[in-house]
Amino acid sequence: MAFKKKIEEKILDVDASMQGTLSFKDPVNLRINGKFEGNLETRGNLTIGQTAAICANIVGDNIIIGGKIKGRITAKERLTLLPSAVVEGDIYPAKLNVAEGAVLEGRCFMLSDYLNCEELARYLEVDLNSIMEWANSGKMPGRKEGSDWRFERKEIDNWIASERTEHNN
């Protein structure tokens, strides 16, 4: 008889007031209930609790918001705004779920699986000339369709992760 071990999930609960840059390379279940200012980059699940007050640029996979956020939010898998959510800033979700009562003051740019040069420049927050230079030199993964470039978002995310790993070693 075989028994499967239950994999312990990494859960981090933050109730304190923090400032700076938080970055997680491995998937984690992060819940923030306090104040945070700065930049936040997560993998896995990020929950912003009802008591949270956040002023940050956030990049994550699955983001659930119940508190107040001011900043840019990029959700590579799904962004969920609960009824108590108040978001002030631009959002970039792959999928979006907005509950009745949630407040969004800003613009929404849905992430598609494929991006053109302009969309990719916005997604990466770099200028269009850099995108064209990287694409034409073969440094960045992409496909030329006629005179236009098309980039698969997952390939770009993997490329960014590998570039960061190379520069950190």
Image (spheres, rainbow, N blue to C red):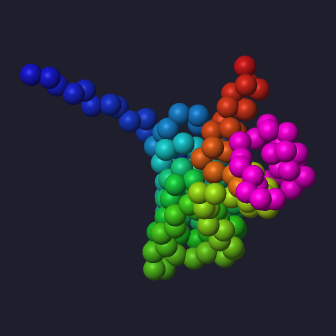
User: Which residue sits furthest top?
Assistant: 169
1 within the magenta span: no
Residue 158 percent across, percent down from the top left: 63, 39
Q: Horizontal placement of 38 versus 29: left or right?
A: right
Quick one: 149 or 64, which is closer to the camera?
Answer: 149
145 within the magenta span: yes
On-image quarter of the C terminus: top right
Question: Does residue 155 show up?
Answer: yes
Q: Horizontal placement of 167 versus 26: left or right?
A: right
Q: Which residues are magenta?
A: 125-149
Residue 28 percent across, percent down from the top left: 48, 39
Quick one: 21 or 117, which is closer to the camera?
Answer: 117
Residue plotted at (46% across, 43% down): 29
Residue 143 percent across, percent down from the top left: 71, 49
Residue plotted at (81% across, 59% down): 147
Quick one: 79 or 149, which is closer to the camera?
Answer: 149
